Image (tube, rainbow, N blue to C red):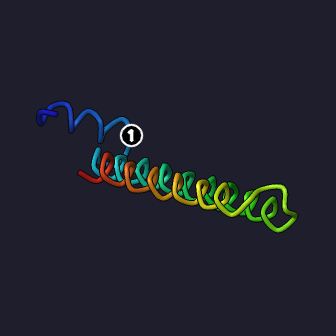
Amino acid sequence: MNAAQVTAFQANGGITPSVTASVLTSLVFAALLLWGAWAIRTAYSGWAEQRLNQRQFMGVVIRFIAMYLAMTFVLLS
């Protein structure tokens, strides 16, 4: 953004673009962690009740970790 765009953004929004980007990134990570906790908890319940085997449970955990690492790379680089 050039200086005029940053000034217009601050005048209309009241905050800087970098603060907005930080807040949006934080919201994405919070939603991702909340979803991950729900997915892992649900998979654990299925594993504890023997509706999922250990391989399926670990698949859920590994997919979440992979997604978290990919989102970290995409959003923080």
Residue closer to the observer: 37 or 5: 37
The N terminus is located in which quarter? Answer: top left
In the picture, measured across the screen, residue 69 lies left or right of residue 34, that is left
* Quadrant in which residue 30 is drawn: bottom right
Residue at the extreme bottom = 48
In the picture, measured across the screen, residue 37 lies left or right of residue 47, that is left
Image x and y of residue 73, in percent: 30, 52
Q: Label 1, on which residue?
A: 13
Image x and y of residue 11, in percent: 31, 38
Residue closer to the observer: 74 or 65: 65
Residue closer to the observer: 14 or 49: 49
In the picture, measured across the screen, residue 59 lies left or right of residue 25, that is right
30 vs 4: above or below? below
In the picture, measured across the screen, residue 73 lies left or right of residue 66, that is left
Q: Amino acid at mark 1?
A: Gly
Image x and y of residue 36, in percent: 60, 57
Image x and y of residue 39, in percent: 68, 54
Q: Count every numbered label the image shows and give the total.
A: 1
Q: Residue at x 68, y 63 (%)?
A: 54
69 vs 17: above or below? below
Crowding around mark 1 (Cα neighbors within 10 Å: few <14, some 14 to 19, many 20+) is few
* Quadrant in which residue 59 is drawn: bottom right
Q: Residue at x 87, y 64 (%)?
A: 49
* Quadrant in which residue 2 is drawn: top left
Residue at the extreme right = 49
Query: Disc 1 on helix, strand or loop?
Result: helix
Q: Residue at x 43, y 47 (%)?
A: 24
Q: Residue at x 28, y 50 (%)?
A: 18
